[in-house]
Amino acid sequence: MSEITVHAPATVANLVCGFDVLGLCLSEPFDTMRVRLINEKKVVIAPGGSFGLPVDPALNTAGAPLIAMLEEIDDEIGFEVNIVKNIKPGSGIGSSAASAAGAVVAANKLLNNKFDRQDLVRFGMFGEKVASGVKHADNIAPCIYGGVTLIRSIFPLDIVSIPSPDLHVALVHPQIEVRTSDAREILRKEVLLKDAIRQWGNIAGLVAGFMKNDYALIGRSLEDFIIEPVRSMLIPGFDEVKRRCKEAGALGGGISGSGPSIFMLCSERKTANAVETEMRSIYDRMGLPYHTYVTAVNADGVRVLGS
Ligand code: HSE
């Protein structure tokens, strides 16, 4: 096998209370990536990709992880990557992670699964470093593992897959760009103990809610007293979206990753459809362009389509 195509899905990082430690994988949207083995030790990013992303592999979120992977391979081989991006950079649904995860999963398949999933996350984080200046795994890990993942630690990596009940996700992406690096820069560096206590109560509650199939507990735990009050200022209509989506039956939700997308978790598809209608009506009234998605949690992560 010398070439492989994968679908690399979008992800929701943080899950409101779990900044940098929780994330889930979505069924849609996804990028399509084709990776080909070449006989030279280098990474080539095919030109003509969407959104004017850099073709210098060291500056590309798919390229940097593959360079890191090649450093751990003795053979004289390399990879050529072709990316059709559907997940817009700066949308808050793991665009950079999809490129990184798709690239390393495809490359690993071409290497007959030389590396394990944890290694792939380790390589993938080099893409996040390119995109946002810091390594974090709360998009990469769910993109590779599928489902809901807890990243207990990144140095050393400790990734835990969390079982969850069926969850439907309504998502709105107001068409503004929030760079993750900027959205991290504005955060306070210190946290009050009383806020930390509420936050870790919610993280524990959310994980317990997923594992016990307790939708009410999931909903109650989707609160964030640390990050959301700061970042939500960057997202027009945020408070109204949250309030009206909950009135329409969503369990809860908030900023997806570093924004500007807003996600809402729902126990049923029809509720997610009703929530999407609320989202649309708010941004139609504001006259702000947007995209919405109604999708579900994707248990499988990056999907290998074959050669
Ligand atoms: N945890 C990261 C952040 C995710 O919120 O900055 C970025 O997608």
Image (cartoon, rainbow, N blue to C red):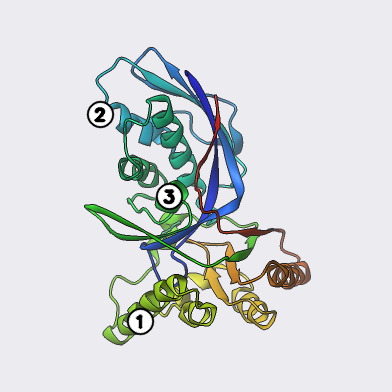
Q: Which mark is residue 201?
A: 1
Residue 243 pos. (x, y %): 63, 81
Residue projecting furthest to the left: 156
Question: Real-space Cα distance between discs 2 and 1?
Answer: 40 Å
Question: Real-space Cα distance between discs 1 and 3?
Answer: 25 Å
Answer whether residue 226 is visible to the viewer in this image: no
Looking at the image, is 202 positioned above or below residue 3? below
Residue 98 pos. (x, y %): 49, 44
Whichever of callouts 3 and 2 sits on the residue coming sooner in the sequence is 2
Residue projecting furthest to the top: 39
Q: Say left or right for 269 vs 189.
A: right
State the residue position of label 3. Answer: 145
Whichever of callouts 1 and 3 sits on the residue coming sooner in the sequence is 3
Disc number lying in front (1 or 3) = 3
Query: Are the residues tagged 1 and 3 within 8 Å (C-beta)?
Result: no
Amino acid carrying label 2: it is Glu
Whichever of callouts 2 and 1 sits on the residue coming sooner in the sequence is 2
- In this rendered view, identify the residue nearer to me: 265 or 183: 265
Residue projecting furthest to the bottom: 194
Looking at the image, is 249 positioned above or below residue 263? below
State the residue position of label 2. Answer: 72
Q: Residue at x 47, y 49 (%)?
A: 143
Q: Say left or right for 285 vs 159.
A: right
Local secondary structure at mark 3: helix
Answer whether residue 151 is visible to the viewer in this image: yes
Q: Residues within 10 Å of mark 2 (few under 14, many from 20)?
A: few
Local secondary structure at mark 2: loop
